[in-house]
Image (cartoon, rainbow, N blue to C red):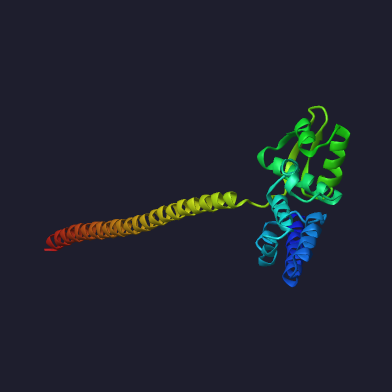
Amino acid sequence: MAMDAERRQAELIGQFSAQAAALSSAPQLAALVLEATSHPALFAFSELLTLPALSKLAGTQYASSLDLLRLFAYGTLKDYKSNSGSLPALLPDQVRKLKQLSVLTLAESTKILPYDQLMQELDVSNVRELEDFLINECMYSGIVRGKLDQLRRCFEVQFAAGRDLTPDQLTNMIDTLSDWLGTSDSLLHQIQEKIKWADTMSEVNKKHQKEFEDRVEEAKKSIKLNNLSRQTSTYGGMTTFSLNLEE
């Protein structure tokens, strides 16, 4: 199911990217931003922000649409309310989308979301409205899975789709992955050295074993020769004794 959702996101991003590349005027591009941020199945926007076509909005009267797209990529409903004076008014579909994205942001930091916190962040006035939103707009859409705990007044998050990474988060992730790669390379080198040492010791043990077996064989041969020599000497003595009797 998660793979299907990711595939759907990729398809939508591809569609909007192709549309943006075919547009030339700022009003058309602003309308495209409105369509993308209102789409019920699109929850990733950072790739659209990097499109050269959308950079045409910068410095125009539609520049706020670019800021709005950036908000949908990284921000929350609370962020919008703090900057609503410089951003376009939201349509009902955009408000719902921004609330969904706000839930995802909260789920990144903790898996137990108190109802009171959610109601404040989502601008919801009562528990019934909050639970309906979590069920109908979040769980049914597949962006989160969890359990509504009415007794404890909280939402227990079991799964939440990831949001776009901010440039700072992306840099930190790259640094973390680089450190992990360096540690992995060092560990791999140590393992290879231990394997090489084990192979060397195995060869040494095989050589010692062969030398030991050769010595055992030599000892066996020596014992056999000694026994044969003793038997021959005894037999010879008995033969001599018999001859003396016949005389």
Query: Residue 123: percent from the left, percent from the top?
Result: 81, 37
The answer to whether 174 appears left or right of 63 in the picture is left
Quadrant where the image shows the C terminus: bottom left
Figure quadrant of residue 31: bottom right
Number of dots carrying numbers: 0
Figure quadrant of residue 8: bottom right
Query: Residue 154: percent from the left, percent from the top?
Result: 77, 32
Q: What residue is rendered at 77% in x and 47% in y?
A: 98
Q: Which one is nearer the viewer's eye here, 37 or 190? A: 37
The answer to whether 247 appears left or right of 218 in the picture is left
Q: In this view, does 115 lie above or below 58?
A: above
Q: In this view, does 238 lie above or below 134?
A: below
The answer to whether 56 appears left or right of 233 in the picture is right
Q: What residue is rendered at 87% in x and 37% in y?
A: 129
Query: Residue 186: percent from the left, percent from the top?
Result: 42, 53
Q: Which one is nearer the viewer's eye here, 216 or 118? A: 118
Q: Which one is nearer the viewer's eye here, 132 or 102? A: 102
Quadrant where the image shows the N terminus: bottom right
Query: Residue 28: percent from the left, percent from the top?
Result: 79, 65
Q: What residue is rendered at 59% in x and 52% in y?
A: 167
Residue that sits furthest to the top in the current view: 151
Q: Which one is nearer the viewer's eye here, 30 or 185? A: 30
Figure quadrant of residue 40: bottom right
